[in-house]
Amino acid sequence: MASPADRFYTDTHEWLKPDGDSLLCGITRFAVEELTDVTYVDLPAVGKAVAAGKAYGEIESVKATSELYSPVDGAVAAINDKVKADPSLVNQDPYEVGWLIRIKTDRKDFSSFMTAAQYDAKHATA
Amino acid sequence: MTNTAVTASLLKTPFYDFHVKQGARIVDFAGWAMPLMYKGIIAEHQHTRQAASIFDVSHMGRVKFAGKDALRFLQHIITRNLHKAVVGQSLYSLVCNPAGGVLDDVIVSRFEDHWLMVCNASNRTKLLAWFEQHRAAFDVTIEDQTFETAMIALQGPQVIAKLEKALGEPLSQLKRYHCRQLRYLFFNFTVFRSGYTGEDGVEIICGNKLAQMAMGFLAKSGKDSKEQTLQPAGLGARDTLRIEAGMPLYGHELSEGINPVAAGLGWAVADDKDFIGAAALAEVRRSGPVEKLVGLHIDGPRTPRADAAVLAAGQPVGQITSSCPSPTLNRTIAMAFVPAAHAAVGTALAVDLRGASVAATVTPLPFYKRPA
């Protein structure tokens, strides 16, 4: 299954989607399948500063616990309360309903991130 | 998702193609390409508790012992006393080193003219070498049948009734930890009333040929019915099911550094025969184990991972061996080794959850018992 082409991807399996003056962020289908059933998501408070490449939260599944990394410098503009209440939404739909945080950032150039095609070439899912 | 580069070098069970066709996520488990999950671990777990699941457990070792001294040899290497075992009976046992540490946990079954041991996949080659090392004084043949045979577990409250109908055999009369040899067309297979989920059910060992026929049939019947009773379940659900059932997993609750008495398996250690490790284990019994395996209920939604520290009065005293969010109890459960002084049911402890101290309470094992 091809990853959505309307956004960018990181080596740590996060996606980021520019949306007005902020970025919507989540984790990829590949990451979700590695994790298995997601059971808990720890997200920061709105307003908290995040830094590129630094952990902003944690995600737990039946099998594993992983850190969530911010792709950019910025501040948390919103978190997905639905996912906090029902973490399985991340399994069901990691790209839309299962988004994790919205980050307010000044960054406008995303050319250092992978495109969907580049990400999929690196992490082929069959 | 199947990463062919990863699976190419791995051993494959006769059901490998079935797993791939069913969309399983394949992982390396002790050198075997095994299904971690198909649709989801929690869904497969719940289906097993409510209906019936089929697990491929062909990766487990199957070793046959025959010859004049087969019984005498087994008595020497396993902790359980087999002298009263009757044909068709299976016994859970440990294989220990001289210090009483666990080399593996196994199930040994008696047949007319031989014995069969089922061991963990991760320990099969280690055990075979151990047997070679200790067989000199015995007239015994040891045959690793792992690659000529397959093994599946059918687990869940609906298994026995469904299987009785399908096979025309009164399997409900087969006692727990007993087995029976049956025949389908030209093929022999053995049904064991046992499992690793806390549910009723069976484990079946058969030749590879019959295994392939059976899976072909299952794959066909599973294609168009979402509501199919018997559904495949992977190693992920097998793990959460066995944790709820308080069953040990080698490498977690058992290892060469852990003795069976500490792990709560003293009942599987004979005190009326000699075997490798007997003296050390008699001493552990006399003085009492220093540490004990306990169940823990952990507050909150988070899951500690294996090796997380267990705290008493803020100080690390023990460690988590297995933990999961329990789909049946809807709370986080764990098994842990703690000093005997902290092992009483009801003891308030805490768990270091990635730096945060989270309250935990010692709870009886198993966490889950199937309704009678």
Image (cartoon, coloured by chain):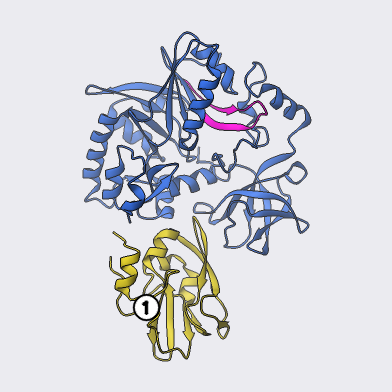
Chain colours: A yellow, B blue
Label 1 secondary element: strand
Tag 1, which chain? A
Relative placement, left or right, of B18 versus A43 is left
Where is residue B53 drawn, in percent x and y? Answer: 37, 43
For the residue carrying disc 1, how many other residues have a C-alpha within 10 Å: few (<14), some (14-19), or many (20+)?
many
Asked whether residue B25 is in view, the answer is no
Magenta part of the chain:
B89-107
In the displayed structure, B70 sits above or below B13; it is: above
**Residue lying at 53% horizontally and 14% vertically, measured from the top left:** B136
The residue that disc 1 covers is A8
Which of B186 and B143 lies nearest the eye of the viewer?
A: B143
Where is residue B113 drawn, in percent x and y? Answer: 41, 12
| Amino acid type for the residue under numbered disc 1 | Phe
Asked where in the image residue B67 lies, by quadrant, the reply is: top left
Magenta stretch secondary structure, dominant: strand
Asked whether residue A35 is in view, the answer is yes
Asked where in the image residue B180 lies, by quadrant, the reply is: top left
Where is residue B46 drawn, in percent x and y? Answer: 43, 50
Asked where in the image residue B75 lies, by quadrant, the reply is: top right
Tell how many labels: 1
Which of B250 and B92 lies nearest the eye of the viewer?
A: B250
Which of B265 and B14 lies nearest the eye of the viewer?
A: B14
**Residue lying at 57% horizontally and 43% vertically, measured from the top left:** B252
Relative placement, left or right, of B196 versus B16 is right
**Figure quadrant of the N terminus of chain B:** bottom left
B345 part of magenta stretch: no
**Residue lying at 58% horizontally and 42% vertically, measured from the top left:** B366
Where is residue B141 drawn, in percent x and y? Answer: 44, 15
**Residue lying at 48% horizontally and 15% vertically, measured from the top left:** B86
